[in-house]
Amino acid sequence: MTDKIPTYTEATQRLEAIVAMLERGGMGLDETLKLYEEGADLLRLCKTELATAEGKLNELQLDEIETQLQTEEQ
Amino acid sequence: MTGRGEVTTGPLPIGQFVQLVKQTVVRDPLFNNQALKGEVTQWKQYASGHTYFSLRDQDGQMRAVIWKGRCAIDPSIKEGSEVVIIASIDLYVRRGEIQLNVERIEPVSVLGELEKTKRLLVEQLRKEGELDRLRQPIPALPRHIAIITGAGSAALADMQRLIENRWPGLRRTVIGVLVQGPRATEEIVRGLAAARRLSNPEVAKRRGEPPVDLVIVGRGGGSPEDLWAFNLEPVARAIIASPVPIVSAVGHESDVLVSDLVADLRASTPSDAIERVVPVLPELHYLLDEYEERLGVASRRQIHDSRQRLSILHARLRVAPMAGLNRAKANVLTLSSRIKVSTQRILGLQSTRLAHFEASLSAIHPQRVLERGYSMTQTSDGTVLSSVDGLNIGQNIILNFADGSADAEIKKTQLNEGTK
């Protein structure tokens, strides 16, 4: 895997590949452990992603959001 | 309401009957917010601000009223104008007359003009290649959705309800804008600009939320004129220029709007937009749980297999030096047993053959013949006699039996009948 943090889609695709490799079997202990670690990291990442998508519900009129943005962009 | 029960006991007062008719008629959705077209006759604008007219064509007509301030009236509308109205039916009980309460009125010529402008815009966008431009992918997991639509509209309520069903608490910012009327275009464009600013990571950081990564712009269904802002160039250009993917979600079935043509995703209604971009959270959790389970099971099996392979290797390693010797020993053993077996087989065959031979030999031994009662005759010089021919009277012969011999003398000879 690259150093770049994968997107949710990339993470689940890689997870699928890892699980498939492990299920196919026939690999050494070293490789198994490495893949397991990577899979566990990806799972953690995906769960964090799901959690961070939850948040505030803003419902604003156009004027309100524009005023807010005006102050935030200064 | 004195009900229908009185009909059976006596005549119903006409006023009550008209009330009943009114209640039935105004409740029918077919007669509510219906788009109608026809010719204006008896057009009359009163000082009170109300406008009365009849809408007619060759097959029928109906009275109509535009209450004061209900909607803008194009000054070009006059006696004989072709118009499209949005109206609901009403019954004026006092007179027992059905009339249309008009919500919108547009001269048909204006609609024709709009259609022409739209066609030109689509043509222009096609020439610029904007209709074939590469669309931005919709994020699989939107972190922050901006929804640009009418504040307090039914479409917004539908979208909010659907999101809560699919992903409770999904982060979103609703930007309430006018979606119809003369200011709609400007407000939608400003709404898109605000969403674009919310997608700026710097701004988002200051607001303490993730940048907007998906925009839904739309409204519920309505007459073509109501939806017209979504056919205008400023909205189309703002959608094209958006750095964030945009879903066009205008509720309508027949006509395709320009916003649909240029957006990154076209949804048929606001609800459809939500169903297409908001994942169902429990399904995602289920999928991750499944991966977790499979990852654990497969890894444990792999580790177990590796351990087993290791112990087999270990055992083999331990006995390796002996292996060559053992193999040689085994070879010798195999060979010697094979030799033994084949020798025995050969010997066995031969002794059987010998026994046979012996048996046939002994069957023809002279001694055996004598034992069966035959005797052998010899001359005194030992010649075995097999014929009577050549014997003389008085000649001495020896008779041999199985258990001894006797001397005898020939008294008489004779040949068997038929023997030469």
Image (spheres, rainbow, N blue to C red):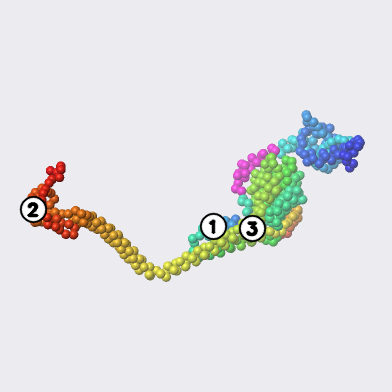
Residue B73 % position (x, y): 80, 39
Q: Amino acid at mark 3?
A: His
Dominant SS in magenta: helix
**B91 shown above or below B189:** above
Q: Is residue B107 visible?
A: no
Q: Of B395 and B351, which appears nearest the observer?
A: B395
Q: Is residue B292 left or right of residue B2?
A: left
Q: Is residue B130 magenta?
A: yes
Tag in front: 2 or 1: 2
**B264 shown above or below B45:** below
Q: Of A21 and B235, which appears nearest the observer?
A: A21
Residue linked to disc 3: B285
Chain ID, mark 1:
A
- Given contact means CB atoms under 8 Å apart, are the residues at marks 2 and 3 in contact? no
Residue linked to disc 2: B395
Chain ID, mark 2:
B
Chain ID, mark 3:
B
Q: Is residue B397 left or right of residue B179?
A: left
Q: Residues within 10 Å of mark 2 (few under 14, many from 20)?
A: few
Q: Amino acid at mark 2?
A: Gln
Picture residue at 88% right of the left edge, 39% below the top: B5
Image quarter in which the N terminus of chain B is found: top right
Q: Residues within 10 Å of mark 3 (few under 14, many from 20)?
A: some
Q: Tell me the number on the disc at residue A20.
A: 1
Residue B162 % position (x, y): 71, 51
